[in-house]
Amino acid sequence: MSTMDVDPESSSSTTNSQTEEPQDVGVSLANLIFKMSNPSCNLSEKKSASLEVLSLTKERGLSRLYASLSSNADFKELVPPLDAKLLKNMQDAEEVKMTELDAAIVDARENLGDTDVRAAVLAKALYVCEHGTREEADKALDEVDALTSATGQKMDLVFTRLKLALRYGDLTQVGKLLHDNTALFASGGDWERKNRLKVYEAVHKMAVRKFSDAAQLFLDAIATFTCTELLDFPTLVYYTVVTCVCALDRPTIKTRVMDSPEVRTVIGEQPSLQTL
């Protein structure tokens, strides 16, 4: 399952933020792979998605994903046969990188301070999240967690774990992470992290069909949206409109959705929303 099942029309609109974090590679790949297997997508759309997936896979050197896609019978018409030489090159590059990351951790522990040790362990964990198995990623993040005491850094680790769970379509784990870390986010942290959390909560509520809760969370987050690692602003507006139409009364939709300046900036570029 993809992070987001609905595929809104693309748009060039941006958020209110001056600088945007690019969408997480794993989240992007999960969405594209979902499109490749989505019965509602035509063959042309599936082929376009598969080209993007293969491009990202080769660009990032993701050997496990490349091997998995090439051996998946469901994608036989979309993915070329496995290139053994390409796969070997990816695996060799990953091995070299892991050796470098391990060496950096050893150096930090022998010659540097606690902050540098944590930074080196985190760098390895983020690489493993992208290139390793889910079990390897969870273990690597546990090692970072053991070195983390600052509230903001703990929150950032929660976001990393949420993205990992969403990549695998594990909504149960997403819900557990959100529930288990309620106290953490209530205890401190800046408004930007708390606002980002609302988007993760909204996506989860939407995915489990709690549209009323999702709509309120999307509306709360839309004016100060910064969660671009999960989705872009036009997609946020799309989900906001759809969940609000499903769950809210007409007066609320009029005042909080139709008259919203954030919604009005992009709705003209998404014809399907205009019909709603």
Image: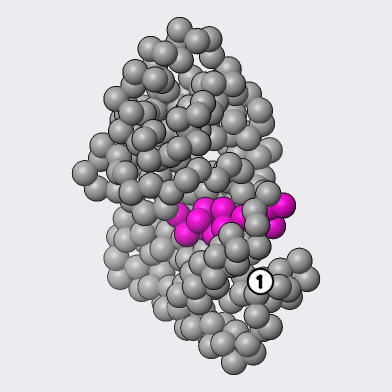
Q: Quadrant of residue 114?
A: bottom left
In this rendering, is residue 198 above or below 124?
A: above
Furthest-right residue in view? 73
Q: Residue at x 57, y 82 (%)?
A: 91
Q: Nearer the viewer, residue 234 or 91?
A: 234
Way the structure is coloured: one colour
Relative to residue 227, is residue 276 drawn left or right? right
Q: Residues within 10 Å of mark 1 (few under 14, many from 20)?
A: many
Q: Nearer the viewer, residue 72 or 171?
A: 72
Q: Residue at x 59, y 21 (%)?
A: 246
Furthest-bottom residue in view? 85
Mark 1, secondary structure of its residue: loop
Find out whether residue 62 is within the magenta segment.
Answer: no
In this rendering, is residue 141 above or below 102?
A: above
Residue 218 percent across, percent down from the top left: 45, 27
Provide the residue designation for mark 1.
78
Residue 164 percent across, percent down from the top left: 56, 51
Find out whether residue 25 is within the magenta segment.
Answer: yes
Residue 151 percent across, percent down from the top left: 38, 36
Q: Nearer the viewer, residue 132 or 67?
A: 67
Q: Residue at x 40, y 44 (%)?
A: 232
Q: Nearer the viewer, residue 113 or 144?
A: 144
Q: Residue at x 26, y 37 (%)?
A: 16
Main SS of residues in magenta: helix
> How many circles with numbers are drawn on the protein?
1
What stretch of residues is rendered in magenta? 24-39
Residue type beneath disc 1: Leu
* Residue 139 visible somewhere in the drawing: no
In this rendering, is residue 100 above or below 197?
A: below
Residue 190 percent across, percent down from the top left: 31, 31
Furthest-top residue in view? 251
